[in-house]
Amino acid sequence: MTSKKTIVYSQRVEIIESYQERRDCADQNIPRFLGACGFISVPVPNVVQAVEDFINTINPAGIVLTGGNSLVCYGGNAPERDATDKKLLEIALNKRVPVYGFCRGMQSILDYFGCRLEDVEGHVAVRHLVNGSWGEFEVNSYHNQACLQVKEPLQIAEITEEGVIEAIECQRYRLMATMWHPERENPFRKSDIERIQNLFNNG
């Protein structure tokens, strides 16, 4: 029997004032989605000092940067999340580990490569069409900020009619990202699953 590959995924930070705690958490649909893709998944803590040892121990076949928490430079309140995403990207690029980011995860990738985010309207809790090299189809949308122009080595994969970039890829570093949430589709979409499988199985 062939053993399944392990994928690690980032978590959002929830601030619980009554307990004076900063908690890491993630939607249970994230490991369900990655399981549907055929992978075992393990969450990464937002403790940047432990991230490198964590990745070296797990030795994942891929990294997923998930949604939640705006970047601090755009009004967010979880600097440890920013630091963890940045560290994960640095490790991935150095070790040639494939990365998939969605929503905030895509924003982390864009920010890492110096691409500016802009405030956008009409992209929260709606569905809309995207078009590009992956085809034309409808996606879910849960974001207030987006990118309108990317820099090399990133390339646009999908974009809306009004010019909001909804998916990017980068062949040089095996990066792929979407502004939509694949784990929020019910049932999970076959095309999302196939893209993730292709990224992590051929990385």
Image (cartoon, helix red, strand yellow):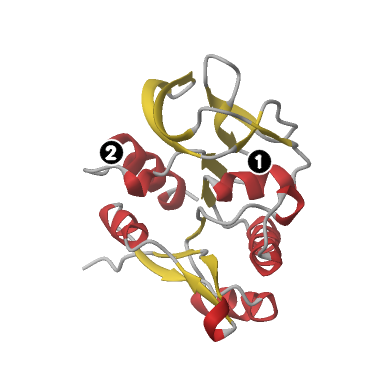
Above or below residue 101? Residue 8 is below
Above or below residue 140? Residue 50 is below
Q: Identify the residue shown where x is 53% and y is 48%.
A: 101
Q: Identify the residue shown where x is 49% and y is 76%.
A: 58
Amino acid type at image mark 1: Arg
In this view, the residue farthest toward the bottom is 19
Amino acid type at image mark 2: Arg
Q: Residues within 10 Å of mark 1 (few under 14, many from 20)?
A: few
Which residue bears the numbered disc 2? 189
Q: Residue 172 shows which numbered tag?
A: 1
Viewer-nearest of labels 1 and 2? 2
Residue 6 vs residue 186, the one in the foreground: 186
Residue 99 vs residue 66, the one in the foreground: 66
Give the Cα distance between marks 1 and 2: 26 Å
Residue 76 vs residue 81, the one in the foreground: 76
Q: Quadrant of residue 30?
A: bottom left
